[in-house]
Amino acid sequence: MEHRLGRTVRVFLVVLAAAGFHRLTVVPLVEPRVRDASAALEMSPEEAAAIRARADRRLAALGDVFPPGAWERDDPIMLESRQMRLLFKDYHSLPDGRVNLVPCTLVVLPDRNRVAVDGQAGRTIVLRAPQGAVLEFDEPLDLRAGRLAKLIGGSLRGQVTIRGTASAPGAEDDIEIVTRDVELDELEVRTGEMVQFRHGRSSGSGRGLAARLRPRAGPAGRGPNIGGVDVIRLDRDVSMRLEGLAGGLVPGGGAEPAPAGAGTDAAAPPVLVSCRGSMCLNVSASVITLEDHVDVVRATAGGATDQLSCDLLAILLGRRDKPAVPGEPAAVGRGGLQPVEIQAKGTPVVARSSGAELEARAARLGYEIATRRILLDGEEPVSLVARGSEMEARKIDYCPGPPGDPGSLMAVGPGWLRVRSEKSPPAQARWQQWLRMRPDGDGHVVSISGDADVSIETQGRLAAAEMHLWLDVVEPVPGALPARPAHGPDLSRVRPARLLARGMVEADAEQVAARTDRLELWFRQREPAPAPQAVAAAPAPA
């Protein structure tokens, strides 16, 4: 009996010792957050006062990030890392190691490594959650030292506002996003709620936000590893109002002249963009992509409308030019990003401009806003209708010239061109290989290859393997109104100078018919008859 009792006592002592060893060694390693977080958050009144005094000094260094009267200016607690500031008023730790902060504001400072490379001041991002946040860090918060640990994740309750300062002094590209109930990961911000956003003077809305953050350049070090925003995505039901686009966003934009005395950007009507699918802003690549029933509309003050409809639209962004003269103010939004090119896909893409009398149809459309260059291609024939001309081919690449200049054109594949003019009869050209128009000296030359066939109403027809027509550009009539920028071939000021046709040439005119291997023609323009001069009547005899 004693032997059994002694053995039982020894077993009990061994178990008790093992439990004590586990409590002293294993438990602190496995579950350190609750105990350490509670200890780290417990402070004396003197320590709390010192922390708030330090927060006041750090807050002053942030400048005007917070508006007057904001709670962040009223004695907050602040924790900091090299690039992030965490501000809050009240706090307590949760059993799972997370921390409940009410209210809560996160400030992400510009990445100093990128600022040194780009030479820009950089953007400061402020994320505000007045109803509080529950956050998780890789180690307990140390309020005494004011040091911020690495953010693992968390959630922001109620209304959440995300603001970003301008990317450079004077650049009107500040950002504001308003939504609700945001979830945080180390490098991602997301919500399924409605989102209102503003970028500079432009604004919009959508549903479902996911923002991917960019890791900081260089070694990770302590604290959050955030170098800025990489991608912002809205899931569906996106609408935007884009301001300050003087040249528009689609072919034909800018055809209506701005009111006299108005600034270029200030007078530009807004561009309305909407889609049923997602919108993705790739900050690193400077590209905005919209999907599913994309519509772009701009109505000018004169009643003209520019419109683009497609299935997928990519807007390429570039920086505005700086002032050429030091100290001279640039256009509104200087230094910020603006659209420089669009790429659209659809079945088909349709672009219309009533002001420019233009319509383009293609499976793929590219448009360079500054040069007004249009590129159309796809598996099916594409078409371009401009003021006074209509064209169809497999691929069309057209770049307008200055006002009154026909520009440059390349149309590949079997196609045709119809031209109408007030001063000339209608003309039509057909080809199997290509039609090309390009500058040549002071004029232009138009070349057609592959069963070239040209007919002019009431004048005759000319066919050959290839044709080359040299055109002279005449000076505008003195006192005439200045020509508007063209978005299609402008033939109003060109006159034929010389024609060369080669290979199985057939000419059929009203008074002549011929077949030859080579035909050359020179054109002589009739000088307009001088206007009759009025003769003063002799005074009647008295």
Image (cartoon, rainbow, N blue to C red):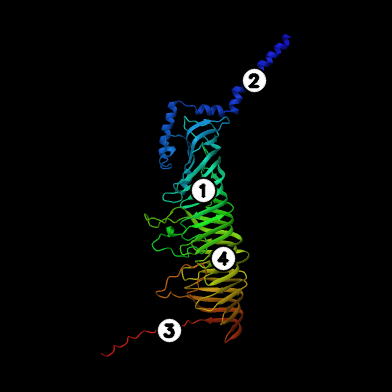
**Which of the two marks, 1 or 3, is nearer to us in this view?**
1
Q: Secondary structure at mark 1?
A: strand
Image side of residue 415 versus residue 158, left or right: right
Please state which of the two labelled residues, at mark 4 or mark 1, is closer to the viewer.
Answer: 1
C-alpha separation, residue under disc 3 versus residue under disc 4: 40 Å
Amino acid marked by disc 3: Ala
| Above or below: residue 155 compared with residue 273 | above
Residue 219 in sight: no
On the image, the x and y values in percent for residue 207 come to: 56, 48
Q: In front of the other: label 3 or label 2?
A: 3
Q: Tag on residue 18?
A: 2
Mark 2, residues whose alpha carbon is within 10 Å: few (<14), some, or many (≥20)? Answer: few
Circle 4 — which element?
A: strand
* Mark positioned earlier in the residue sequence (2 or 1): 2
Quadrant, the N terminus: top right
Residue at coordinates 42% horizontally, 29% vertically from top-left? 49
Q: Pick whichever, 189 or 506, lies toward us.
A: 189
Whole-percent x and y of residue 392? 59, 69
Q: Give coordinates of residue 37: x percent, y percent.
A: 53, 29
Q: Residues within 10 Å of mark 4 (few under 14, many from 20)?
A: many
| 143 over 16 or under it: above or below | below
**C-alpha span from label 3 to label 2:** 119 Å
Question: In the image, which disc is placed on residue 196?
Answer: 1
From the viewer's side, name the closer residue of 28 and 390.
390
Residue receiving disc 3: 529
Residue to which mark 4 is pinned: 360
